[in-house]
Image: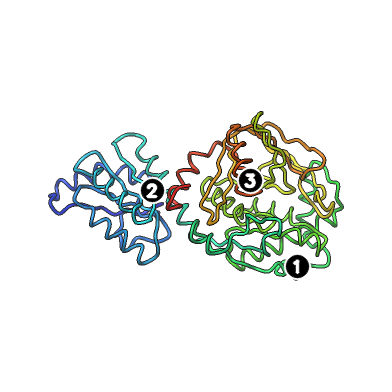
Amino acid sequence: MSGRFSYSLAVSPLHDEAAVARLVAGLAPALAAAGGEASDPEAAPRDRPLAHVVLTGGTERIVLARIEARAAAGGREPVVLVAHPGHNSLPACLDLLARVRADGGTGRIVFLAGEDGDAARLGEAVHLAGVALALRRARIGALGEPSEWLVASAHGAEAVAATWGPELVPLPLSEITSRLPAEGVDAEGEVALIGAARASAVAASEVARAGAVHAVLADLVAAHRLSAVTVRCFDLVAGSRTTGCLALSRLADDGVPAGCEGDVPSAVALLWIQLLTGEAAWMANPARIAPERGELLLAHCTVPRRLVTAFDLTTHFESDLGVALAGDLAPGPVTLVRLGGRRLERIWLAEGELTASPHEPGLCRTQALVTTNPEALAELLRDPLGNHVVLVPGHRAAQLGASRDLILAEPA
């Protein structure tokens, strides 16, 4: 079975073969348990992380040359340096990582201490590096321009690729509208969805019409090899008299992160979170912020069904057309994320507890009440990065921060 990552050994020519063999034997169990596979650095696959196992000191130039050769051949990638307690391995790694960062790169040192947790620490580091590599191979489809009200969320392809890695693939919204049938055709999916809903306030024909949007989007995802999408969905309401809420929910459940309103930062965040955690995330509007109580109310008309314990089918809030989901999100720990800044280089993170899923009138259909750090909410009001916030189950701030440091050359 192919490993999760490749690794190459770096050793000073001053060390004899017997000493090197003992070092390798001592590190081999942790490397194997973490999913490592020995490889020549030049032959190591580009689609998975390469860890540099620094066996001895005096190897700094050797490892640096390997890093630079990989960058010249296929672009910069996160550098994972593996150190151990002897033979000046750690001092060499410290100097190497300092140089990598000085050159505008990112990296991490994993210290193998001969303990039970070694493989887990190494496995986490290569996972984080793998997320960064996956982002650089990803393609985000932008179906239509960002909605005109998203004046802080209309980042272009150059900023997305330079800061986070994915290719932003612009596609006209007509790629959807021109393919929509006169009537919905997804009868089987329509019946299953209505049967799964707690209640439905919309006609089966409307569910079928919204289901047709999903079928078209799924075809576009396959045709353009898209990893995620963001859709200028309000134009579907105005032009086609249907909504994308159901389609985006179904795509997310199928493993394709899907955002609304053409919001680029949220699409990047949704994709990042899924690659990192394996979880679907929810993009929503902050509808009410009460820093003094540490409360934030979020609301949106679509949500991945795998995040809710029950849902109703209803209409889209602003237009009262099409199909939207009014879901009940599971209570428990959550993390809130917002990307922003001129080049998407800034991140707002807050951990909290989802305490309720109200259904207040006058707001988008799925709602979540979150308690979190009052200072974080005060910052959200004082220095916002834009409208939408992305919510993922679990307390993930440390994992997200560690991942960010391997993606962004200058941590936010």
- Establish if 208 lies above or below 385: below
Q: Residue furthest front?
A: 382
In the image, what residue type sits under mark 2? Gly
Q: Residue at x 35, y 66 (%)?
A: 72
The image shows residue 170 at horizontal and vertical percentages of 62, 67
Q: Amino acid at mark 3?
A: Val
- Which numbered tag is attached to residue 35? 2
Instruction: Name the mark on residue 177.
Output: 1
As rendered, which of 241 and 288 lies closer to the eye? Answer: 288
At 38% from the left and 56% from the top, the residue drawn is 104
Q: Secondary structure at mark 3?
A: strand
Residue 291 lies, in percent from the top left, at 65, 33
Q: Residues within 10 Å of mark 1 (few under 14, many from 20)?
A: some
Between disc 3 and disc 2, the foreground one is: 3
Q: Earlier in the sequence, mark 1 or mark 2?
A: 2
- Point out the tag, 1 or 3, that comes first from the N-terminus: 1
How far, Cα to Cα, is label 1 from label 2?
A: 45 Å
Q: Is residue 279 above or below residue 144?
A: above
Q: Nearer the viewer, residue 341 or 317?
A: 341
Q: Is residue 320 left or right of residue 189?
A: right
What secondary structure is found at the residue carrying circle 1?
helix
Question: Which residue occupies the foreground of this view, 361 or 33?
Answer: 361
Which numbered tag is attached to residue 389?
Answer: 3
Please name the amino acid that badge 1 sits on: Thr
Q: Indicate left or right for 385 with 95 as reference.
A: right
Circle 3 packing at 10 Å, graded few (<14), some (14-19), many (20+), is many
**Secondary element type, mark 2:** loop
Along the horizontal axis of the image, is 34 left or right of 342?
A: left
CA gap, disc 3 and disc 2: 35 Å
Q: Give the number of the mark in front: 1 or 3.
A: 3
Residue 279: quadrant of the picture? top right
